Image: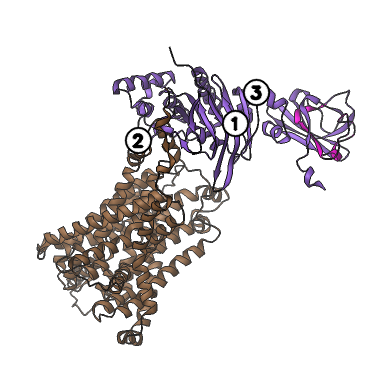
Amino acid sequence: MAIDIVTVVPRSLALPAWTAQLPLALITLVLATPVLAAALSGLLAGGGETWQHILATDLWSTTLTTILMLALTGALILAIAIPAAWLVTMYSFPGRAIFEWLLILPLAAPGYVLAISYYDLMSVSGPLQSAIRKATDWGARDYWFPDITSLPGLCFVLAVALYPYVYLTARAAFTTTSICAIDAARTLGARPVSVLWRVAIPSARPAIVAGLTLALMEAAADYGAAGFLGVRTLTVGLFRAWSSYGDAAAAARMALILLALAIGLQWLERLQRGEAGVQATSKRWQALERPRLAGASGWLAAGFCGLVFALGFGLPVLRLGWIALETGDHGANFGGALVTSLLLASAGAGVSFLIGITIALYARRGWLARLAKLAASGGYAVPGAVLALGGLVALSQMGLNMAGGLALLILIWIYAARFTAAGAQPMEAALARAPRSMGDAARALGTPPLQRIWRIDLPIAFSGALVAALILFVEILKELPATLMLRPANWDTLAVRAYAYASDERLAAAALPCLLITAAGLVPVILLSWRLSRARPGS
Amino acid sequence: MSAPLARLTASHVTKLFDGKTVVEDVSLTLEPHTITALLGESGAGKSTLLRLLAGLEDLDAGEIRISGQVLSTPHKTVPPERRKTGLIFQDFALFPHMTAGENVRFGLSHLPKPDGKAIAQRWLERMGLGERAHAYPHQLSGGEQQRVAIARALAPKPEAMLLDEPFSGLDPALRDEVADFTLGAVRESGLPALLVSHDAQAAMARADRIAIMRDGKLVQVGTPDEVYDHPVDAGVAAALGPVVTLSPGEIPDGLWPKRLPPGEALTYREEALVPHEAGKISAQVTSIRRIGADVRVIYECGGQHLPGRVASQNRPVLGDQVKLTLDPSASFVFKSPSSGRAQ
């Protein structure tokens, strides 16, 4: 076949290079504005009266409370997650295969849902204390019972809610990075416990700390659990300064401290990683020959894993289900809140998805792409309350007032700024499955570039994109503080409604929305654990 | 019945990336019934030249034609989907969401579906994969994947074949078998073919012509015998097998018939230095190491360590004094690359 020279496409038909960069520049601006606005207003704001008030009474104690909360929560998380991950990876015991993924489930329930459930479980009239009184004939004042509405109570709730971050990273590190090192240690005569202390934990340390950093950033950003349990952390203080005192400047100062904390945690994480890095010592992966824990020790291991699962998921979720069934109090206009949640989550996920896929398609192409990615991951690291504040500050700087339609736009904007990174990452991973050679092959076989996206890239990336969209949808469905700060009147989501009912001590009405949020949260968690169980390096 | 076979020609082709010249003034013709192996170190520009021939890159100077039709000039590039070149990649680049049969059919989408299916099936059968049409790439072994890739590239009847390090991703045990099979299929088609490789031994064993690139330039083209026996410089000699280069001061008396002027150097292939009773220099055997069927021997001569190579059955005894000769047909005198700087 002769090739007709007339059909040759002149290169000049392509758009000039800078136009391709426009969407990226826009995305960077959209994602970075809330953080920058919050930080700048915190730095530049004059000291209002409220600020003086907070400084005199509250700032040091909220900061101290936050740091204490992070330290205690972190210690609890390590104490729960590392033994659980080690047992499940290294030994065989009754129920091991089930616990392997059951232990991830607490990721599905946001902290405020667990806080609400534990508040009921532990209250004077709750099932635990009632059972004690029934069994002993004591009165309500005759015994000591731990108070969940306290700093240790909050730390307990956050730890059982957030430990899966460390459980997942530690488990991955134990299974993949150190098999050869563990084999070597064994042949050198180390006993299992000493293998854990001397080899496995040190070599998994970068992964463990990375997981812990994520968990602690979530803990610092938490508004719902701390606010509900009455612990004045910085996020709670920020929220109150904004909503009770109406002082944006004071809130911005607190936001600044929170930002510093988030940056500090990231910095510590990098620092400890040091030269070691998260590097596999060997690419060899093998099905572990798990020693069997016989008799009592096997049941002890199963008991430990069972307890962790029960505390993080089973017990609180069962209790919520019980309350919801027992009373039938579903509050007013439950359907409206459901529709609002679905609408907002769909819109927010849609916008974040488009931004995320643009970033993923541009990945590793120039500094602007890196900047957009940085803006996305920056937003993901910043508490929702800080971003919401930044959005409000930016809006007032533009001389605009929050009103119905605009407020919705701002809320979706903040969702995108906060969550885009959560979607961009899986999409990038999915697109990476179609390397350049595959596109070249398609073109050499006669497929023009645009058709190539349709016939190769999208089918290959489809499942990854679906997962990304799902993660975004559920994250936004669970979001509380930004929604609480920005939603227009009559736009209560399930999360807002649950929190409001619980704050009014109408726990029964809060139970059903809590359960629905948790059920939605289960979908991506199950998908995640399914993907983890299929993805085995080196197999 | 079939159309006459094409000839793919690159003339004075130059390609820059960010102002850096990656391919410089390369002229190369791929003839029908000829497999040309393109050798060179990584970064020499081999893959870029292949991508220019495929139309995956635009060129900055020169011209690429197939049988007289212009494919690439600095102003116009016939896009890869409209030139008929078959490509085979190191990572096979099979589409993971399609079966083997669908992969082979991919380039036949202009045909009615039953025809495409029949042709794809025939190609899979020729590759010994008739039973595997419904398997997905991850269900196939490395060798099977490579065979699907060949079938996919050949099925649309390309006019030339371009193979980018197609065997380096394979298990060493499998590599020879797959290479024989693949190049056998290419040879049977009679298409002009370019095989980018970094394995000089395998390339010399299977290709009809060898082209060697260095720093973006084509330094020598010829049959395997021509380039091996008459390399144009020490770099080309070294690219095809182990060599030793001695400056005039390092050459022991009697090893080479005449004195070299400064600025030249003696390069010999290791197998050129052998023990022989008629040898003019004597040396001591200080080390013997087995390399396949040969042994590599280090001789010490006046403080100078000279590597040589002999068949294992002819190996000298460690520690013995031996006489050495240097085979002139595998020894070359070149301008020393460092002569300009030596002063």
Residue type, label 3: Thr
Q: Is residue A275 found left or right of A77 in the rendered image?
A: right
Query: Mark 1 and mark 2, same subunit?
Result: yes
Residue type, label 2: His
The N terminus of chain A appears in which quarter of the rendering? top left
Q: Find out whether the residues at labels 2 and 3 contact each other: C-beta distance under 8 Å.
A: no
Determine which residue is flagged by label 3. B223
Determine which residue is flagged by label 2. B97
Query: Mark 2 and mark 3, same subunit?
Result: yes
Q: Secondary structure at mark 3?
A: loop
Which residue is farthest top?
B1
For marks 3 and 1, give the one nearer the viewer. 1
Q: Dividing the picture into quarters, in which one does residue A501 lie?
A: bottom left
Q: Secondary structure at mark 2?
A: loop
Q: Which chain is brown?
A: A
On the image, the x and y values in percent for residue A144 come to: 26, 77
* Span highlighted in magenta in the image: B247-274
Closest to the observer: A516 or B154?
Answer: B154
Determine which residue is flagged by label 1. B27
> What's the chain of the residue with tag 3?
B
Q: Is residue A50 above or below residue B200?
A: below
> What's the chain of the residue with tag 1?
B
| Sequence-first disc among 3 and 1 | 1
Spatial distance from mark 1 to mark 2, Cα to Cα? Answer: 39 Å
The C terminus of chain A appears in which quarter of the rendering? top left
| Sequence-first disc among 1 and 2 | 1
Q: Colour of chain B?
A: purple
Q: Dividing the picture into quarters, in which one does residue B48 lie?
A: top right
In magenta stretch: residue A53:
no
Closest to the observer: A185 or B287?
Answer: B287
Closest to the observer: A324 or B198?
Answer: B198
